[in-house]
Image: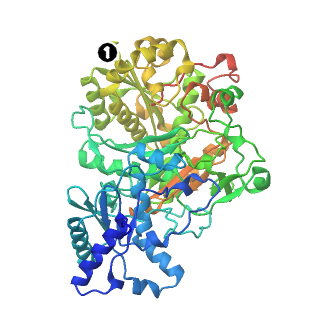
Amino acid sequence: MRTLTPVEELTRLLGEYAARDGRGPDKVPTVVELGGEDLLAFERSPLREAGEARPDLRDADIFLTSRAVLIGPRRSARSERSELSARSARSQRSERGCGHCLALRLQRMQPVHERDLLETSPGAHRAGVWPDVGDQLAAAAWAAFRHAELVPAGDLPKVWRIDIRTLMMTAAALLPDSRCPSCGDLDPEPPDLDLGAPRKPSAEAYRLRHPEDFAVPVEALVNTVCGVLAPATSAALASPTTAPVAGSAAVRGPTGLHDLSWSGQANSYAASARLAVFEGLERHAGTMRRRPGLVVGSYTELADRALNPSDCTAYSADSYLQDEHLTPFDPDRTIPWVPGYSLRDKRSVLVPVRLAFYGWDGGAELFSFECSNGCASGGCLTEAVLFGLLELIERDAFLLAWYGGALLPEIDTGSLDRTARAMLSRARLQGYDVRLFDNRIDLPVPVVTGVARRRDGGDGLFSFAAGAGMDPAAAVEAALGEILTYIPSMRHRVRARREELVAMTRDFSLVSGLADHPALFGLPEMQEHAWRYTRHADPMPVAELYHEWLRVRPATDDLADDVRFLVDEVARRGSDVIVVDQTSAEQQAAGLSGVRVIAPGLLPIDFGWGRQRALRAPRMFSALRHAGLRESDLTAEELHMVPHPFP
């Protein structure tokens, strides 16, 4: 007699339990196996809109893996679903989630080594045997299934996980997956972006709601069964400056799976946990396309309605030769595009997926390494656009000052409000003195760069950060908040890799990733390169520095006025402002919107000395002259050719 597979054996045993309860064969739960098939392959196929629908996964009742049995998600009865049209059924499942959503989430939560084998090793197969599916496991699965039927439907479907070895049961909430091929919304929305007229609480308030006002489904975003963002978050209880909470998840990049971290930094762990989830959702939406509307074609074919990647500044020829992952942009190559909208020109424009998102979709056209620069979220699209554009302005100003060797006006810290002075005191308790600089170049928007310096001159010497905001006080607090995040661990991070960092001081080409840039300036050996931020200066009161800005900035309660003001300022410097709506279903469930803002004429921030596009951008040479800080454009020989310290 043929030996039954684990799925067949569990189905047989569940059938016996169903019969004991007086149920017919049609009432026996459907069991499917997970773990032996790569269900995320469609995400790594850059020219595909979506994967194939899987009714077997979508409609399954019980999922069997090598570690657990999962029941759910609980949904409407099949008899009710069968009466719906295909379109209305999709709409209902999109709101509730389905078994295919659960299967995708389970694969994303697998250990990195298992995911790599499954996703990148053709021909790999399971080794060993499954645990026996005995009567005890079947009894637990049947009890959980019956329990799931009796639980009233809530806002989110529930999933129950039974550990095969211990029979411990864990319940978790499931959010629909944005890109689920079986229940995701594949109908593209029009790309026009209407800023509307969202009303601010006051003319000086730029967030429409407080973080605690959002109904964030934390239980579905962070859980050990099917969490969208991570199995759990961690609080740094020993932090002496802030109350940080962080999480991370494995995402695929061009060199393999790596951790994508997100965090919240506030004065209480409860507030930090909420902010961390907001950032996690923003990163989740920004790494990979999770909305419909893919267009496939070459720039040559789409030029009349597409952003030219060449306008965003290319790397040097040496960068493409030395980096095996980079490929020069080819206007005749077929690549994927997504809808965007030009706020300057008020028209739809296609944007390469490579510029709109910073994850990895398996494509070969890696003509740009992007990061989260310009990605932001908010209570509406307009709010998200405002903060995405402010971030671009902040990084642009920082790079212009650093590589251009600008001597920035210093802010008198004695003129700051109580909140900022308290933050400075925390830094002093850690042995750091902080100086703040007005980092505006040729745009009037407040940008503040903060530099913390150890008083003893030892390892962990410098910590740089910047902030931008419509309110100068907000820009100051943003810069100080970043500094307070980094300084407690700066000395440890430098000492943990001191020999490696010292080698970078002799050969900047060894600076290859994001973490290298701030860590390098933790070395006392680098202080000669930061003299512009340690020189003697005559600090000016914040009210005096920003008097003109406070006079000319919009003074209305319409948030769209603030966005239009910034767009006009950036356009005056020759750059378009393009918005890609990144909002995922998971963000929508929390009442959030997410965007990627692209300003091709502003300086892009890169990490790795061999990939500094800013040093080749026309704006790098002309902005200081436009600002009246020089009489002529910079020359290549005058650039400050030292890796930036931006964290």
- Residue at 53% of width from left, 52% of height from top? 288
Task: Say if residue 185 shows up in the picture.
Answer: yes
Q: Which residue is denoted by mark 1 in the rendering? A: 455
Report the front residue among 129 and 143: 129
Query: Which quadrant does the N terminus fall into?
Result: bottom left
Determine which quarter of the picture holds residue 474: top left
The picture places residue 642, in percent across and down from the top left corner, at 55, 19
The image shows residue 606, relative to residue 79, as above or below, that is above
Which amino acid does the dot numbered 1 rest on? Arg
Task: Say if residue 535 shows up in the picture.
Answer: no
Left or right: residue 432 compared with residue 116: left
Left or right: residue 584 compared with residue 234: right
The picture places residue 305, in percent across and down from the top left corner, at 74, 56
The image shows residue 27, relative to residue 292, as above or below, that is below
- Residue at 72% of width from left, 53% of height from top? 306
Instruction: Please say which color scheme the image uses.
Output: rainbow
The image shows residue 163, relative to residue 13, as above or below, that is above
